[in-house]
Image (spheres, grey):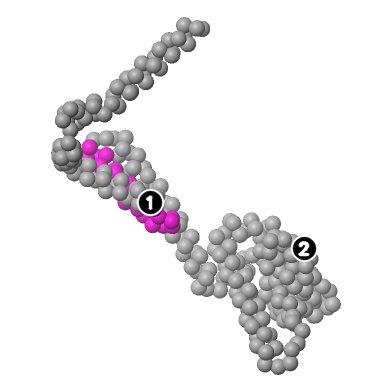
Amino acid sequence: MEPSVADFSTILDRILNTAADNLRIAKILVQMGLDPNNITSDALFNRLVEIVLANITLANMFALVGAIFFVATLLMQTMVPLRVANMVGCTFLATFGALSGNVGTFLLYLLMLPINAVRLRQMLKLVKKARNATQSDMSIEWLKPFMTERRYRRGDRLFRKGDAAAEMFLTVTGRFLVKEIGVELPPGRLMGELGFLTPNNQRTGTVECIEDGQVLTITYERLLEIYFQDPQFGYYFLVLTSQRLLENISRLEAIIAQQMAGPPTAPRDIA
């Protein structure tokens, strides 16, 4: 056991000594064709220029451009330009591999091209879906198969402000009233969606049934699954909640303007 340890230590020492010898500045200068005892900045610069000029070939130019595009991908913050730059870099480096006869380099970057193309196509489709979700009224009909029917009678309270929220509602028939702001919700309106986004999942208002009706409900757990499975619905949901918040802000501004114009009244909560 001891001789093996000694042999390994000896081999390691030889490797380190050889590496140190090869990395000496004097030896590197000799390999570059320079005299270590008579080195000047002009001589070093001229030698570097000679090396660069000697290696200017069509294959190396393709490699240089490809490397520039790959470095550019490290500076990009969005995925679509990154994928495009990566594909351009792969094209130039694959060409470099073909011109230089390096089969490994050629196959590596050639295989990376379709992978980046597929990812870019997926990203563009996702962007298109998100744009469509903001520019058109997305129907909520497709969500109904995931929802459960529930009926309420006049006077029933669906939920109270501050209660723990665990589900979202879609009104189908009847009328429902948000008590804090006195707003009626007709059929086809979502309610309880803000509780899905609050930190503690708490209700932001109290809703009562003022006319017998039917609603569809979906739990936040199921809604979260759909949110991540369908990016278009996820983006639409964010737009929907943002619109609801803007409506609340407008309503609050109107209340403040009314209070400033007339006698002071008690402020009302915003759902």
Q: Give the main secondary structure of the magenta stretch.
A: helix
* Camera-nearest residue between 145 and 108: 108
Vertical arrangement, residue 79 with respect to residue 179, above or below: above
How many marks do you count on the picture? 2
State the image coordinates of residue 252 (x, y, percent, origin top left).
Answer: 66, 81
Vertical arrangement, residue 155 with respect to residue 92, above or below: below
Res 206 seen here: yes
Residue located 64% across and 83% down the image = 253
In the image, is 114 to the left or to the right of 41?
right
The amino acid type of the residue labelled 2 equals Ala
What numbered label is drawn on residue 174?
Answer: none
State the image coordinates of residue 146 (x, y, percent, origin top left).
Answer: 68, 61
State the image coordinates of residue 120 (x, y, percent, origin top left).
Answer: 41, 54
Residue located 47% across and 11% down the image = 5
* Camera-nearest residue between 262 and 197: 262
**Which residue is under mark 2?**
164
Res 214 seen here: no
**Which residue is under mark 1?**
73
Quadrant occupied by the C terminus: bottom right
Determine if the magenta segment contains residue 246.
no
Residue located 59% across and 67% down the image = 238
Vertical arrangement, residue 132 with respect to residue 109, above or below: below
Please state the extent of the stretch shown in magenta in the rendering.
75-100
Q: Are marks 1 and 2 in contact (CB under 8 Å)?
A: no
* Camera-nearest residue between 141 and 176: 176
Vertical arrangement, residue 87 with respect to residue 208, above or below: above
